[in-house]
Every structure is written in C-alpha cells, then in structure tokens.
Amino acid sequence: MIKTAREWDIPLGEFPLLSSDKLRYADTDQQGHINNALFSTFLETGRVELLQHLDLIKDKSPFSFVIASLQLDFIQQLYWPGQVHIATGILKIGTSSIHLHQALFQDQHCVARANTVIVQIENMSAKAVPFGEVRRQLLKSYQFPEI
C-alpha cells in the first residue's frame, strides 16, 4: 500500500533541501489566509531549487522535467505576514522518474505535505528518458535515508 503524503511525517530538519518564500498580502483570499492554489507554487519553488542544485536544468539542455503525479494534503492554513519554508527530499529514484516528498512549514508547524513524481523527458520527442549513472548518483545525494 502506498503511503499518503500526510503519512510521511518527516520533521523539517530531516529534509535534504530547505527553501523559503515570502508570503505576500496579495496571496491572501477572502477568508484571510493564503490561497490554497499558492501551495502548488511553493512546492514548485522547492522542486526547481532541487533541480538547480543538482545542475539538472540548464538553458539549451535537451532534457527537462514534467510532473506525472502530485498528491497534496492540506494540514493547516498559512497566514500572512511571514514566510513559508519548503522542505524537499527524494523518496525514490526510478528509471526516468524522481519521487519527491515535500512539506510546507510556517513557524515550525507543518501546514501541507506532498508527494510528487517528476519525469525526465527529451524535449524534442517529449518521451521519458532514463537517467545516466552520473545523474543517478547526483540524485542520490538528496535522497532520504531508508524510511
């Protein structure tokens, strides 16, 4: 049975990569909290920073990444003003896919968890392309220890 994002209860300090975003007044909705649509944007920040840290996204690269699956569990509301901390780590490395676990935190409290699968594709054909050994080793540096 596959765990839901909420079942991966990993503390903030145990994620391989931490990022942050400033919460803006314009991000709030009629209820006075950060609009739920922004949660996906925050997760994107973490994913892109991971790929940048690994030097896997470059101008003129023949490869890019697409989202194949996103499971997002909302746990608490986010409030302006403040920051959101974006925690990102790799659960599993497939042939051409990366299974990520991410969590969003405000003031050390987890407000959302997500499991995302991204796939490396060749830009011209838009088909999945297996990782070479060098990329696979780079990805392992951001993988969680056995959970």
Image (tube, helix red, strand yellow):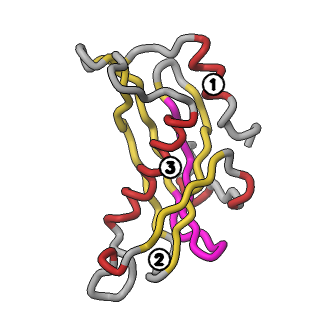
Residue 72 location, quadrant: bottom left
How far across and how far down the image is residue 141, in percent? 69, 31
Residue kind at label 3, given as amino acid type: Gly
In screen coordinates, is 36 left or right of 92? left
User: Is the C terminus in the top left, top right, bottom left or bottom right quadrant?
Assistant: top right
Relative depth, front residue between 37 and 68? 37
How far across and how far down the image is residue 92, in percent? 60, 32
Residue sticking out furthest to the top: 132
Residue kind at label 2, given as amino acid type: Leu
Circle 2 is placed at which residue position?
A: 78
Which mark is first along the chain, 3 or 1?
3
Residue 24's disc number: none
User: Is the N terminus in the top left, top right, bottom left or bottom right quadrant?
Assistant: top right
Which mark is first along the chain, 3 or 2?
3
Residue range of the region highlighted in magenta in the rendering = 98-113
| 21 shown above or below 30 | above
Relative depth, front residue between 90 and 16? 16
Mark 2, Cα crowd under 10 Å, few <14 / some 14-19 / many 20+, is many
Picture residue at 51% right of the left edge, 78% below the top: 82
Picture residue at 60% right of the left edge, 38% below the top: 90
Q: Distance between the residues labelled 1 and 3?
A: 17 Å
| 141 shown above or below 15 | above
Circle 3 is placed at which residue position?
A: 46
| 51 shown above or below 129 | below
Residue 138's disc number: 1
